[in-house]
Image (cartoon, rainbow, N blue to C red):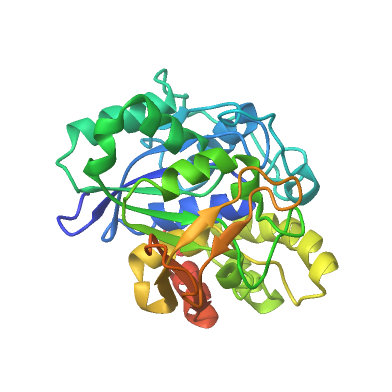
Amino acid sequence: MTYPTARKVIIDTDPGQDDAVAILLALASPEEIDLLGITCVAGNVPLSRTEANARIICEVAGRNDVKVFAGRAAPLSRALVTAEQVHGKTGLDGPELFEPAILLQPQNGVDFIIDTLRTEAPGTVTLCPLGPLSNIAAAFQAAPDIIERVQEIVLMGGAYFEVGNITPAAEFNIYVDPEAADIVLKSGIKITMMPLDVTHKALTTRPRIEALRALNNRAGPFTAEMLDFFERFDMAKYGSDGGPLHDPCVIAYLIQPELFAGRHINVEVETRSELTLGMTVADWWGVTDRAANALFMADIDADGFFTLITQRLARL
């Protein structure tokens, strides 16, 4: 059922355990989110795995009707950097995986983004990139007319106070394709960013994971098993009580924006420096005269966030 108040959304993703939770949250929230399709991009793992993972997640949710598209297999102009050290060889290490029955759509994901934005009414489609911005930027380059038709971009990426997680200066999604991020941030579209500054406050503590494991459906235990694996890397790296659940922040914001707080500031991406490539230079204190181009989030109600995820995933 489609709700008249639901926002039309395309999720652009490179699943990844945290991407998977974001997809599940979207599929469990039809009142707020009308998911038009999922476009996949190379990032956490290569494209052949991200598109399979997206289909697996839809099947876990019992949503074999969701259309999944494969987009770019590489950044716009760089060699692909992946993150198997975080997500495991499959990208969804943890639960027992399977060959999904859902078929990949024949259309390229970049073309799906272009066609959808041209077909839907202007200002009614929100793009939700959870990985590198290669597909989004490629669509904007190929079809500049769609840029003004985008309602909003809500993305996971970047960092300021938390600095980098793939290099000392850069967050992974932006680092993998900084040229794409630069194109998106200079597009003039309304942008909301979920940087590491927010996501590192959304930790998968043991009680939060066990609440998901206790759900009486397929999605809850599957998610708990993913997070059992996913949190190990970051707990060892940061000495925290759990791993940061990055990507579901994007979907949670569409459902309950009051969970988040940030500032409307200027954000630029470093594309040339060897030392700080992919850094999001966020003018948090307003020390330049550069125009604000993004709502850059800094705080989250973590308990409310995990309550939302647990309550919604229970519906699946």
Asked if residue 303 is positioned above or below residue 181 in the image, the reply reads: below
Give the camera-side residue of 223 and 262. 262
Q: Residue furthest right?
A: 236
- Picture residue at 28% right of the left edge, 60% below the top: 32
Report how many numbered discs are placed on residues in the image.
Answer: 0
**On the picture, is 310 further left or further right than 168?**
left
Asked if residue 56 is positioned above or below residue 199 in the image, the reply reads: above
Q: Position of residue 193 (x, y in %)?
A: 46, 61
Give the camera-side residue of 310 and 17. 17
**On the picture, is 38 further left or further right than 198?**
left
Give the camera-side residue of 122 and 178. 178
Give the camera-side residue of 191 and 48. 191
Name the quadrant containing residue 208. bottom right
Name the quadrant containing residue 109. top left
**On the picture, is 165 further left or further right than 22?**
right
Q: Residue furthest top?
A: 106
Q: Position of residue 18 (x, y in %)?
A: 60, 55
Asked if residue 311 is positioned above or below residue 139 in the image, the reply reads: below
Residue 217 appears anywhere in the view: no
Q: Position of residue 95 (x, y in %)?
A: 70, 49
- Picture residue at 51% right of the left edge, 55% below the top: 268
- Picture residue at 23% right of the left edge, 56% below the top: 6
Name the quadrant containing residue 67. top left
Residue 79 appears anywhere in the view: yes
Q: Position of residue 163 (x, y in %)?
A: 68, 65
Location of the C terminus by quadrant is bottom left
